[in-house]
Image: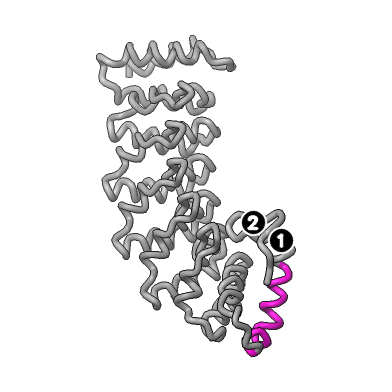
Amino acid sequence: MLEWRGEYDRTTGWTEKQFSVIHILLVQSLKVIQECNNPKLPKLMKLALHAACRLNDSEIAEKILKESGVNPRELITFETDRRFTALTIACSHGATGSFNVILQQCIKENVLKDVLMKQDQDGYTPLHWTCHRGHAEIVQKLLEQYKNEGLMKEILMKQTQDGYTPLHWTCREGHVEISQMLVEQYKNEGLMLEVLLHRDENWRTPLHKTCMNGHVEISKVLLEQCKNERILMKVLLRRDIYGDTPLHTACQEILTYIVTCIKCIELQDLDRFKTKVLNILGRRNSIIDVRAVSEQFAEEVKR
């Protein structure tokens, strides 16, 4: 039996060398393992299925489910010591082929709802992992299943232990396509306002994440939603645990776009907003030209 030690993959606890060994075992010796009548066979088959998902070997994954002699329900609901299921592993590694095999088996065994909402020891669900790693095709398929199971509203606001929603992850990592998919779902479920204001353990909103990491396109998407929800000023001036607003870390292109959005701010709040913005920019150690931003404010007010 493989030992769980050394430099390992976070989702399985295995080293790359162990992956290589077990894959050879899977491809060449599956039938032999079945015939050896080892009492540890069920555990080995569960681990083997996880390896097949990690390596995106859908043929082996299907073979294990159908021919291993172990109850398929046990195989797909088995959790590692870090509480990863086969579906979680397939999602985290973008293993589309294995994902489809496990998904169909979950539907067949009537355990899809539980597996979709399963959180690992850090609070990640399959959707959190795919949003984090940027696997757009799997995100789309997962969203369809969450909708079918009536879980969409719950999963969109599900948090990891550090307070991340799925949107926080895509905003941090800069996955534009996935962010757009999620925004549509938040709008459809009436959760846009809630998620835009939601803060993680460091009090950071999704806009904090995009500005900190220089993701211009996603920042623009979020800013448009802030305008639509009439909370632009509130979100832009929201401070994290260190006292920083999104304006403290936004790049020039994002700042320029922010100023073009000020027409949605009530006139009586505009001077106060402008003063706060210019004060923040004045304290920034950057190349931002405060005078230029001030002039841009004036131009926008005239329009």
- Which residues make up the magenta segment? 20-35
* Residue 299 on the magenta span: no
In this view of the protein, can residue 162 be seen by the observer? yes
On the rendered structure, is 27 left or right of 158? Answer: right
Q: Is the magenta stretch mostly helix, strand or loop?
A: helix
The residue singled out by tag 1 in the image is 16
Q: Is residue 198 above or below residue 42?
A: above
Neighbour tally class for label 1: few under 14, some 14-19, many 20 plus, Cα within 10 Å: few
The residue singled out by tag 2 in the image is 9
Amino acid type, callout 1: Glu
On the rendered structure, is 36 left or right of 162? Answer: right
On the rendered structure, is 201 left or right of 189? Answer: right
Q: In which quarter of the image is the N terminus?
A: bottom right
Disc with the residue nearer the chain's start (2 vs 1): 2
**Spot occupied by residue 215 in the image (x, y as percentages of width and height):** 52, 36
Real-space Cα separation, disc 2 to disc 1, in angstroms: 8 Å
Q: In which quarter of the image is the C terminus?
A: top left
Residue drawn at the location 72% of the way across and 75% of the way down: 24
Residue drawn at the location 64% of the way across and 56% of the way down: 9
